[in-house]
Image (cartoon, grey):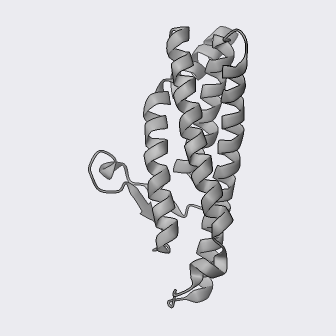
Amino acid sequence: MPAEETKQLCILTREKLRDAKQELEQFLNNHCVTQLTEGQTDQPAETEAYICDFLADLRHLSVACELGYEKVSLVLRRAKFNHDFAEKVLSEIVHSCIYCFYYPRNEVYEEDGRYSYTSVDAIKFRQTPPEPLRQITVSLSKIFEILRDELEYYETDYVTRIRMQKT
């Protein structure tokens, strides 16, 4: 991929990661387990455990987005654009941020690929989450869908090229 195209991709990635981390920070700073379990009547212990797992996954995603944002910002701040370093960082963002969103550790939700190109939400929750958790997840899915589509080249091609250079 040409250097200018890679640079534009870095700029887009930085913007999307900034948006994601801002949404996550605002949500995590303004919501707690007791607030989210309010009004949940069926199986309160199970629901609370699910919400705790959900928040843990969001905190993990928040850290991944923060680190990805810092790395891609570093790429763009350098006086001379380093194409190889930029490709490495974009590949790391795919494997840390995007995978972290689509494959959360606690499996509180998953993407149903059958719905990913329809107007129906592609995210399927393990349990019915409180509305604020559902809203933040759907909102983040729009950001990560754009990132995944734009960075899919780095998901396989970059890693394959690096492996071929080593042999």
Query: Is residue 154 visible to us here?
Result: no
Question: Residue, x 72% and y 39% (percent of image)?
Answer: 67
The number of numbered discs placed on residues in the rendered structure image is 0
Question: Residue, x 50% and y 75% (percent of image)?
Answer: 130
Residue nearest the observer in this picture, 148 or 160: 148
Q: Residue 30: horizontal and vertical position, in percent? A: 64, 68
Question: Residue, x 65% and y 9% (percent of image)?
Answer: 165
Q: Residue 109: horizontal and vertical position, in percent? A: 50, 61
Residue nearest the observer in this picture, 1 or 21: 21
**Vertical placement of 120 versus 11: above or below?**
below
Query: Is residue 21 visible to us here?
Result: yes
User: For the view shown, which residue lies furthest in the bottom direction?
Assistant: 41
Q: Residue 62: horizontal and vertical position, in percent? A: 66, 51
Residue nearest the observer in this picture, 163 or 29: 29
Question: Residue, x 66% and y 36% (percent of image)?
Answer: 69
Q: Residue 28: horizontal and vertical position, in percent? A: 65, 63
Question: Hey, which quadrant is residue 105 in on the image?
Answer: bottom right
Q: From the image, which quarter does the C terminus lie in? A: top right
38 left or right of 60 in image: left
